[in-house]
Amino acid sequence: MVIVYIEAVNGQLKKSSFEVLTYGKKLADKMSSSVAAICLTPCDSNVVGEYGINKLFQVSDAIFSHFDSKAFAKAVAEIFNANGGQILVLPFNQNGKALAPRLSVRLNAGLVNGANALANTSNGFVISKNVFSGKAVANYQIHTDVKIVSLASNSIPAEKNPTSCEVVAAATSVSAADFSTKYIKSELVSGDIPLSEADLVVSAGRGLKGPENWGMIEECAKILGAATACSRAVADVHWRPHHEHVGQTGLAISPNLYIAVGISGAIQHLAGVSSSKTIVVINTDPEAPFFKAADYGIVGDAFEVMPKFNEALRKLKA
Amino acid sequence: MNILVCVSKVPDTTAKIAFKDNNTKFASDGVTYILNPTDEWYALVRAIELKEAAGAGKVTVINVGAGDNDQYLRKALAIGADDAVLIESADDLEPFYVAKEIANYARTNNYDVVVTGKETIDYNSFSVGGMIAEFMDCAFVSQVSKWDMNGNVATLNREVEGGEEVMEVSTPFVLSAQKGMAEQRLPNMKGIMMAKTKPLAKIAAVGGDPLVTIVKFDEPKSKSAVKLFSIDEVEALVKALNEEAKVI
Ligand SMILES: Cc1cc2nc3c(=O)[nH]c(=O)nc-3n(C[C@H](O)[C@H](O)[C@H](O)COP(=O)(O)OP(=O)(O)OC[C@H]3O[C@@H](n4cnc5c(N)ncnc54)[C@H](O)[C@@H]3O)c2cc1C
Ligand SMILES: Nc1ncnc2c1ncn2[C@@H]1O[C@H](COP(=O)(O)O)[C@@H](O)[C@H]1O
């Protein structure tokens, strides 16, 4: 059985959950296997059913209201084993990145962390993922009977495939003693779209000359409903918060649209963004390396281009 | 407090990424290697700062890899680690066995904290830290951007979607570091001289049957040439994004 680990916050499934549910269903179909989901916090089984999953192992113990990799790994492993799990699918998001490696050890299962496509099962079980920060793709064969796949975000579009979903109340032996961390508080950047989950990203670099000029970038993001990002050069001098820094040593992202304004396109920057589906570059220098990685571009001054670009976007959205 | 910092060696960020033997192996000929940036800039530096602030304990750097990886460990010693351990194995050992070796070493030598980088910039596995913690059956906090210690209790900021989560954890624990935790330190002359005489132990790895192997590398899909628009064609660009690329 393929078992998909999903996450809900205040009863709402995260966007990554829709992608892993879609992935789990497709993988199960491909392998003529059954498929089910595990959720450690309350979620709506009807929504799970919309993605083709006909069984939900629902844990509703309030102990799981805060994430702890040790306790969560124990709970997931218990439910997975008790229900004849063979392939575990998780989202490659912040929690998934902490859980999947633990589960690989716990279940003695080969792991592909950050898979970007469905498995090729014609000769063994082979899954591809980006390596060298997007400069290459590696095809990993998993040799163990039990397998773990952690799916990179935006690798496959969520796809509805409605079915009715049976809810199975699942219990675990996890107790407070299994929690090894104590939650203190969250410091959320309010109102913004989380960069790691964003479909659209507007990013800017040193070409903007100073932090006071980011208004037009934020405006563009607002019109599009996009997240904002920046180059390392800009985060290093504190023009922008460090969590916006994308690239080889920052966050690696692969949105549908990445708009780069006044960013040269240094190899370390490209490493974290080049797997974006569509890249738009706005730069005064026609020789800027970023144009080689771009789909669309304007050679021009950001201070002239952006107001016009925003105006045109506003018109489209009107 | 004794801190074990895991450091890996990776191709320089500007290295040409190419493959050989029918695209089954990374072509390492002529490639310059460096310490993985996250390990060097954040994990190692913060561990040294905390040791210095406590005025007690030690910082050990550990690598699982080729027998001649001394030079990378020596750089970590020059930055300020007290001693180093090289567990000799083939380079590119899979994360599972790297973690197993490190967990065994940490357990037998009673380290309070094991620190890794969030990921290496070559295989981007994001795995070794969590695997070490599971082998040690202790806490693991990933993608930590802030790390303070008060006695044996750490206060950590962990990155989550849309912000950070603050948590407390007692030793022993494992964390993976990311940007924000410290400022890069360059080794100075004194550090480089002292590094030459600091202890560096070598141990043989045990290893085991592979769980995963790379069967083939592919180049990323190549991009077609950029379509350029003039500054007076901004509307045409927006139209192309809407109708052709279908992304807005
Ligand atoms: C080990 C290592 C790791 C690194 N990791 C990262 C990483 O993860 N992410 C990252 O981003 N960088 C990283 N870097 C840094 C990287 O090498 C570059 O220095 C950095 O990306 C440059 O940022 P930038 O493009 O904003 O600035 P610059 O290189 O200064 O480029 C500014 C660009 O703006 C253009 N410009 C100027 N004025 C205007 C205008 N008015 N309108 C439009 N365009 C204009 C210029 O033509 C230029 O192309 C790393 C470096 C090293 C050594
Ligand atoms: N061979 C190795 N030796 C020591 N530490 C390693 C090794 N490989 C990975 N690490 C550590 O684990 C972190 C995550 O690596 P990975 O899971 O391979 O992406 C790195 O940033 C290092 O701190």
Image: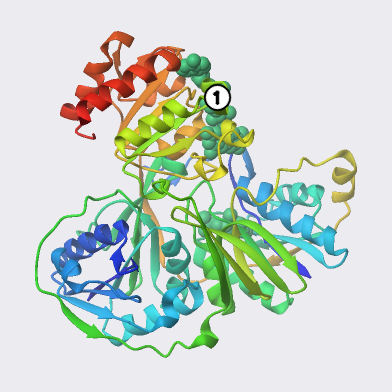
Residue beneath the point at 89% across and 49% down: B194
Please state the horizontal and vertical placement of residue A122, each as a whole percent of the image.
Answer: 19, 59
Image quarter of the C terminus of chain B: top left
Residue beneath the point at 30% across and 69% down: A11
Residue beneath the point at 16% across and 75% down: A34
Q: Is residue B175 left or right of residue A50?
A: right
Identify the residue under disc 1: A206
- CB at disc 1 and ligand 1 closer than 8 Å: yes
Using the rendered view, name the quadrant where residue A223 is placed.
Answer: top left
Q: Nearer the viewer, residue B109 or A157?
A: A157
Residue beneath the point at 67% across and 60% down: B147
Q: Nearer the viewer, residue B2 or A260?
A: A260
Q: Nearer the viewer, residue A121 or A104?
A: A104
Image position of B217 with respect to A39: above or below:
above
Image position of B216 with respect to A231: above or below:
below
Q: Is residue A138 left or right of residue A316?
A: right
Please state the horizontal and vertical placement of residue A285, each as a whole percent of the image.
Answer: 46, 12
